[in-house]
Image (cartoon, rainbow, N blue to C red):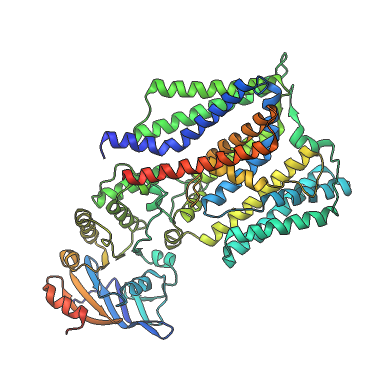
Amino acid sequence: MNAIDSVRDILTRNMRQSGIVIAFIAISVLFAVLNPNFLSPGNLTNIVLQYSYILILAIGMVMIIVAGQIDLSVGSVVALTGAVSAVVVVRNGMPWYVGVIAALVVGALVGVWQGFWVAYVGIPGFIVTLAGMLLFRGLTFLVLDNASLSPFGGIYQDIANGFLNGLLGGYGFDVFTLVVFAIGVVGYAIGQWRTRQGKIAYQQTVESMPLFVVKLLAVAALVMWFGYQLSISRGLPVVLIILAVLIIAYTLITQKSVFGRHVYAVGGNVHAAELSGVKVKKINFWIFVNMGVLASVAGIVYSSRMNGAQPGAGNMFELDAIAACFIGGASTTGGVGRVGGAMIGGLIMAVMSNGMQLMGVPQSMQQVVKGLVLLLAVAFDIYNKRRASVAR
Amino acid sequence: MNERIPLLALREVSRYFGAVEALVDVDLEVHAHEVVALVGDNGAGKSTLAKVIAGVLAPSTGQVEIGGEPVSVSSPSVANHLGVASVFQDLAVCENLDVTANVFLGQELRSRGGMLHDGEMETETRRLLDHLTVRIPSVRTPLRHLSAGQRQAVAIARTLIGSPRIVVLDEPTAALSVAQTAEVLTHIERLRELGLGVILISHNLNDVRAVADRVEVLRHGRNNGSFPGSEPHETILAAITGAI
């Protein structure tokens, strides 16, 4: 392979990832121009609070999609786990953490149930989770006796509505928020630097030093600006901390652990994986258990944000989560997709919904636009893939 | 036949699928530093035999011996453990993973803390590829960006993880161009130089005669002759078609 080929190779390989980031920035700028309130501190905080549970679902969903499966039941699981938590905390007056634990346990059990049917009975995830979607929705109605249950109040409500503010003081802005964001930026810079050094050590092409520094500074500026906006609004949302921890943990699991590697292998070529000694059934089982637990985390956050549980909660969440994965570069045939990509995909959905809401676009048009964006994103993916295979 | 204990020996191995006799009383021996070609017409039982050796299929009757010891190869990972590594026709690699990930798939090195030890795996992969004289631009290239010949080379390289003694290659040159085939044949010769016993399953008699020390013919699931690699084309062909 000569130099031109390898440059083209790198471009086509990174096009999907960088394309999605550019699209995200373009959409944000568009809404910022159309609506001055879009980038206001209050609204940025709002976006985080409003879509955190979709992002949490998308983390689990991207692993399922990478393994070549799909989970249609997460919306119902969000409702069921929120309902169980409400019954424990609101109806029976138990402390908030008992509700959280109960929801997590129910989520794990749901995952075990679905994982069993997919992995050990061999029913496609599409069917199992379609059944689960009905099953768990029905159970939610049963658990709640067909009525809403509220309010949680207290600490439980703060999970999704609470802020860390004033821990380190500050005049008109929260120093603690800025410190947390600064640590994040430094961590990101170190990570990028080490990746770059690694590539140089393996004699791979890297962007030139000035370009690299400019990229780092741009990211740092953007992140710190976002942090500052949060800090002059209400401080650091608790749910953002939960989300950040999950994103970092799952990025490590998918990119650096043996389990994550095997998930990609199963999605890439299940026969090769099996013959190589990958325990395919175990992988399929655990990704569904994992999804169940993450759906229960989303259920906790959602019920906390709503300060109660409704039988109809979480309706259509599965579609938002799945759309986030595909917009974020996951492949419909499995084997390709990243947690980071799914997060950007989720943010694109979030920014579009929020921006259109601010502009007073009717619900009907919002759905039309979101549908088209999903279609175009996947079409772009397929177009890219076809071109790559022709190039070879 | 020499006096050494064969690395791998099959004694009267049979395999039935219901009433179908895929293999009937097949004998096969493979020694170190030897490439044994397994040839036969479609449906002669070559791939079934490869799967029995690789632990994908269990023999219905008969005995498999490795290093002179009777063994039961009940799964691919048991086979790996016993020193048997296999490359199967068409389903050898994951195209979405990079070279290193494919080479170490199912046998990843872990650092302390149980995470992937990428650095060490990359170094080892490059060492293996050098060993086989495989030229691949980067061990971080996803397999979908490689040519069919390079993919086959990666599949062959992955058999060398965990120092195996026997390598089974099922139609490694089936989908390759002439130049790529020549390269894969060089890799096979390297495996022999490294002291492994190689079982090469192929349709292509030219490939077989280029590298094999011995040619074993299967016909309708039975042994139908054993020839030195230098045997003329016609004789082997006659054994395959049943003319002798």
Q: Is residue B88 above or below residue A50?
A: below
Furthest residue in direction top, as rendered: A171
Q: Is residue A127 left or right of residue B140?
A: right
Q: Is residue A253 visible?
A: yes
Q: Is residue A300 left or right of residue B41?
A: right
Q: Tell me which residue sits at (48%, 56%) in the image.
A: A266
**Where is residue A279 shown, x and y percent of the image?**
50, 60
Q: Quadrant of the N terminus of chain A?
A: top left
A18 vs B57, nearest the viewer: A18
Q: Is residue A170 above or below residue B148?
A: above
**Where is residue A161 shown, x and y percent of the image?**
76, 33
Q: Tell me which residue sits at (65%, 22%) in the image.
A: A35
Q: Is residue B117 above or below residue B21?
A: above
Q: Tell me which residue sits at (38%, 38%) in the image.
A: A12
Q: Is residue A339 visible?
A: no
Q: How many marks?
A: 0
**Where is residue A306 shown, x and y percent of the image?**
79, 39
**Where is residue B72 shown, x and y percent of the image?**
42, 75
Q: Is residue B238 left or right of residue A259?
A: left
Q: Tell me which residue sits at (59%, 46%) in the image.
A: A322
Where, by quadrant of the figure, is residue A55 drawn?
A: top right
B241 vs B68, nearest the viewer: B241
Q: Quadrant of the C terminus of chain A?
A: top left
Where, by quadrant of the figure, is residue A209 drawn?
A: top left
